[in-house]
Amino acid sequence: MVHRSLLLALLLSAVLGLSVEDAPDLSGRVHVIDADTFDVGEIRVRLHGVDAPESDQTCLDADGQEWPCGAWSVEQAEARWEGRTAGCERLDIDRYGRTVARCEVNGIDLGATLVSGGMALAYRDYSDDYLPQEASAQGARVGVWRGEFQIPQDYRRGPTLVVTDVAVVDSAGGCQIKGNISGTDRIYHRPGGRSYAATRIDESAGERWFCSEEEAQAAGWRAAR
């Protein structure tokens, strides 16, 4: 159910001819629901651009041992922000009536913190804002990136599916974008993409590593769909 204060804000926006993005920003004390969903004051907020493991989701560590990555992500969020005051920029309303927002505590972006710590992934379906933080987390093997896991979106669709292989990047020069050749197609894969971990680079066949998307595109590669 949409909270009364949010309904009032949306009604005001409609009367004034404003978009959701123009509605008044919000602030309040944080109550963590899960790692990417908080109550900020009386408003239920879904963080923009991030997707955390479900609270009951498990992952595999580097030794193949199961661990409760979803509960861990919630605990990490609670330790950092429970009871703190957050300020949020409203961006949208999702299909569940939650406010989608970018939030900060003391000037620190919550989404960036979650993704850089491996507590959540960049939610590519909606934003590319946190791709650099995700690449850094994967390279450092922190949080869920320490082993194998299902992308949260896939877990919600089928919790019993096989976990996704997320082997950490291993390029001699430290560049993380994989330039793969498939038939006549030259395709580059970014860290965290669906085919990234399964893609192997054979430099003897003309495949290569790139340090940026701009470099890959200039060399004639296109982004994986």
Image: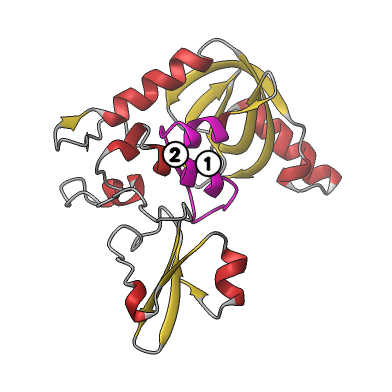
Judging depth in this view, the residue of 186 and 83 nearest the camera is 186
Residue drawn where x is 51% and y is 77% of the image? 221
**Residue 133 has which mark?**
1
Judging depth in this view, the residue of 120 and 168 nearest the camera is 168
Q: Give the left or right position of residue 19, taking residue 44 as reference.
A: right
Judging depth in this view, the residue of 19 and 31 nearest the camera is 31
Q: Quadrant of residue 111?
A: top right
Q: Which residues are magenta?
A: 111-136
Question: Is residue 225 at least partly visible in the picture?
Answer: no
Element type where label 2 sits in the image: helix
Label 2 and label 1: CA atoms lie apart by 6 Å
Residue drawn where x is 31% and y is 65% of the image? 199
Residue drawn where x is 57% and y is 29% of the image? 110
- Percent of width and height locating residue 119: 41, 32
How would you rate the neighbour count of disc 2 (Cα within 10 Å): few for under 14, some for 14-19, many for 20 or more?
many
Q: Is residue 120 magenta?
A: yes
Q: Amino acid at mark 1?
A: Gln
Q: Amino acid at mark 2?
A: Ala
The C terminus is located in which quarter? bottom left
